Amino acid sequence: MKNIFNNKFVLIAVTLLIGLTIGWLLKPAPSPKLEADEHEHVESIAGIPITYTCSMHPQIRQNEPGDCPICGMDLIPLENDNADADPMAVTMSPTAMQLAGVQSILVGNADAGKSIRLNGKIQADERQNYTQSAHIPGRIEELSVNFTGEYVKKGQVLGQIYSPELATAQEELFQAQKIKDSQPALFNAAKEKLKNWKLTDSQIAQILATGKVTEQLPILANVSGYVTDKMVNLGDYVSKGEPIYQIADLSKVWVLFDVYESELQWVKKGDQIEFTVQSLPGETFTGKLSYIDPMINPQTRVAKARLEVSNSNLKFKPEMFVSGKVESNGKSIDNSIIVPKTAVMWTGTRSVVYVKNVSDQAVSFKLREVTLGASLGSEYVITSGLESGEEIAVNGTFSIDAAAQLAGKPSMMSPDGGAAMTGHNHGGMPGMKMETTNHSSPSAVVLTPQAKDELKLIFDSYFELKNALTKDDLSIAKASAATMLASVEKVNMSEFKGDAHMEWMNYEKNIKVDLVKIKSAKSLEDIRNSFLSISDEMVGLAENFTPLASKIYVQHCPMADSNKGADWLSLEEKVMNPYFGKGMLSCGEVTKTIQ
């Protein structure tokens, strides 16, 4: 009986298990069409197609997933692509801003100050230069001062002069002496004649006492000082008033500084100036400017600023080179808007900045055209276009502008915006030129040794072009530009990896445009106009890629480009100006050293 009960229990358990299995197998599968329908319903409500981008290269935007054409990373959906409160602004996520090195500052009113560096020379004080001349006609019989640089004291005998007219005048004096009691006026007139020839009362008294005619007259120094020019030799015949010596009193000297036309507004009479003398290393001197020349030299385009210094110990010698510095407060443009130069992007005709706007949803940047005032070294004065309290991008401006161009929004080269750019094009994107004038990349891009070798050839031909312009050589300048263009076109793009790839593309496009212009250039002026843009790109190339092992000097001329100022690169610290050539070869200064 027990066995029968156990068999029934087992049978029931097996039957139950089989039933559950059959029920699970016969369970209807969920309809895939329903899920698809629900998904389609969500998209239709949003009404916005999904855009895919690269987290490392936000300028890449596609309508379907895939790989980034630059770095190969998987594209991700772009979030909040249309959340801009302003459709003319470009929105950047915090990640994108960090990757692009975007930094911003609040602008405000500030006194416009500038440090002006001046070069010049020490010169003798013109008010203490004297001419020692012959007071009577005759022949030089003796010279006791025979070379320039000799010091003479007032009253010192410089030489002897023989004069027949002197003998005649003495005879007249003797005759007048005999009748001086009856004709005192005649006697006095004879003495005055000798006094006009610079004979002293003691000399005249001696002549009257001896009663003998003296045919030679001593030449007495009128002033104390150093002989700067000896103008006669022994035996020369001289006329009355003819110069014999030039004598300079060097107890006070002038320091004359060259002030360029574009910097005159920053330098004024009474400014404190600190200067050094090249031949007196380790010493610094100060003084106040006492005079500024009202006239500009038409050849050098400079005015002279004068400083008067005491020179009792003769430490300062004429023609010594000096360098000075004036700290100007720019009183005429106080309370101006001052911004770093890295914030400004300049196209040649327009200057623009990107104004930052922060909302609850996103951070956006909008293009704003500004008017530039004076250049303050590393800053600009903004005369219009910005208001105190606004926030602008000062680093990463190039990346913001690139994103704006690719999104078809107003940008530096397309102020009205245009069609959005997508994908990757080695040949350049139609209708777009990527300016890199400000080169706001936060740090240098790391290159492989092979990539640096590619760039070295370009820099070599650039320096040849620069040297040709300093020598005003049109044919060599055009040949160097052609060599540089060939070097740019031969660059192997595969050697530039990651961010360096996109960076090089932008530089390459802009450099080629200006090098091609030089092919048809007819004058040095045309070449220099293209060289200005080329140099802007090369400065950025040098800062971002550091392709050379040697130092590269960034040099600046404030008078180039119609007094707007322009930069160029040099392997030598000595300034050799390519924008003016031999006309003003030394105009400029070193503003930065790239190591």
Image: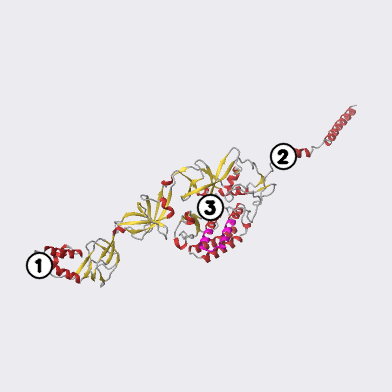
Check disc 3 and give the amino acid type. Thr
Check disc 2 and give the amino acid type. Ser
Q: Are marks 2 and 1 in contact (CB under 8 Å)?
A: no
Upstream in sequence: badge 2 or badge 3: 2
Residue 426 locus on image (x, y percent): 64, 55
Which residue is at the front of the view, 281 or 396?
396
Q: Residues within 10 Å of mark 1 (few under 14, many from 20)?
A: few
In magenta stretch: residue 525: yes
Q: Are marks 2 and 3 in contact (CB under 8 Å)?
A: no
In magenta stretch: residue 217: no
Q: With respect to residue 213, does 569 lie above or below?
A: above
Element on which disc 2 rests: helix
Q: Residue at x 74, y 40 (%)?
A: 40
Residue 36 locus on image (x, y percent): 76, 40
- State whether residue 5 appears in this view: yes
Label 2 vs label 3: CA separation?
46 Å
Check disc 1 and give the amino acid type. Lys
Residue beneath label 2, please?
A: 44
From the image, state whether disc 2 or disc 3 is nearer to you.
3
Q: Are marks 3 and 1 in contact (CB under 8 Å)?
A: no
Residue beneath label 1, please?
A: 178
Element on which disc 3 rests: loop
- State whether residue 549 appears in this view: no
Element on which disc 1 rests: helix
Upstream in sequence: badge 3 or badge 1: 1
Q: Which residues are magenta?
A: 508-530
Q: Quadrant of residue 19?
A: top right
Q: With respect to residue 149, does 96 lie above or below?
A: above
Q: Quadrant of residue 455?
A: bottom right
Determine whether, in the image, residue 191 is placed left or right of residue 576. Answer: left
Residue beneath label 3, please?
A: 349
